[in-house]
Amino acid sequence: MENKLKNNFVEGLIWNYGSVVILSASGFLLNFLIVYFYDAAALGVFNRAYAWYCVFSQIAVWGVHMSVMKLIPEHKEDAGERELIMSSALIGVFLFSAVCVVLIEAVLPWVVTANSRLLASMQVVMPGLVFFSLNKVLINYLNGLSDMKAFSFFRSLRYIVIIITIFVLGTLQYDSTWLSFSFTEAEMVVFVCCVVYLVHKKLFIKKPSLKYVREHFRFGTFILMSNLVTEINTKVDIICLGFMVGDDYLIGIYSFAVLFTEGFYQLYFVVRRSINPKITECYVGGEFQKGIEQISGKLKKYLRVLSPLALGMLIAGYCVLCFFLQQEEYLVGLKFLIIICLAIMVTGRKIIFGNLFAQTGLPLRESVVNTITVVSNFTLNIVFIYFMGLSGAAVATAASYLIFGYALWYYAKKELHVTI
């Protein structure tokens, strides 16, 4: 039995990392296509719109996907209860996200007044929030069931569709403000495919339960700030540069490098998704401390070797891509990449345990840790960008990862009595 669980975990990691390879390759290709067909200014607008899309996406889903992620492992053997959990989450998040989209679209023209291209780019991407929210619930359901093959496939499908859409738009020479529509289209495709798969597997059929709708939004309200500030934390530098620098070309240069750091971050985030159900199982099974110590020990052993290797390959790939594009000005971004990735590497194990509190029924504590992180990140970005420009954004972002690592370690030891 133990060997079977171990094999399933390893298989899940392999599928997850396969999807990360596609994600990372898509990130490189996405940047390549935008720079090839358009320019750095177009890339800057695209990434500014994407940054705000990521922030609003966490509001639209309201943490319901994390409630699903917690409840499904607890009812893994009860198909009827799982279906109630799933149906309730879907109907609740659909209604709420649809209202959010209507409100955001109504407010945008009154808020984004200084940059018409940014406004147009944001307007075409916001409808994707409804499908994004539904997909987060559906995919977390698969994650909770440890169906990592399907989970990895649908995550990969999203980025494949994005790349195809950007390629078609670039080839047909559509205006660059339509590039962000690739996210909306990708979420629609993933939603349709995911629903077909789940219906075929007969994984959700029941009518929603008001009890679970309330439970999802209760848990989601507690975890919302955690998810929101986590998402904001990865976009604070782009958002602050948009306000303080405002030059889409310079932001494009910076964001070209930062997208590579997000791919590096995903290497750790994938492992987080794989161990999240295990954390809940250890906690419910009464072997929490022992389980966390074993997971932490294995992570320390493997990350010591794999992290520097992955960073070296990322740096080499970035340089090759810049020379291939014959865009040497993007090499300036190499220092931003190295600064941020070094901090991610140092904090790698903490990033993997980032949902430790949510998986043990303490979403509010996770929100506290992530709020400390994003407030620090925002404050440091304002100060460092003022004095150091683009380099200041990279230094501030790197510092925020270190602050997150310390805060998570401190509260895990204090509240859960485990050392990570």
Image: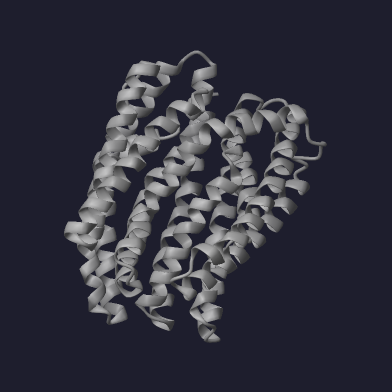
Q: Position of residue 90 (x, y in %)?
A: 71, 43
Viewer can see residue 333: yes
Viewer can see residue 338: no
Q: Position of residue 67 (x, y in %)?
A: 60, 33
- Give whichever of 28, 407 is nearer the camera: 407
- Give whichever of 299, 411 is nearer the camera: 411
Q: Quadrant of residue 320?
A: bottom left
As drawn, the residue found furthest toward the left would be 387
Q: Which quadrant is the N terminus positioned in?
A: top right
* Number of numbered callouts drawn: 0
| Residue drawn at 30 percent across, 72 percent down | 321
| Residue drawn at 48 percent across, 75 percent down | 117
| Residue drawn at 55 percent across, 53 percent down | 155
Q: Position of residue 106 (x, y in %)?
A: 62, 61
- Give whichever of 352, 105 is nearer the camera: 105
| Residue drawn at 25 percent across, 39 percent down | 402
- In this rendering, position of residue 205 left or right of residue 162: right
As drawn, the residue found furthest toward the front would be 110
* Colour basis: one colour
| Depicted 419 relative to depicted 277: above or below | above
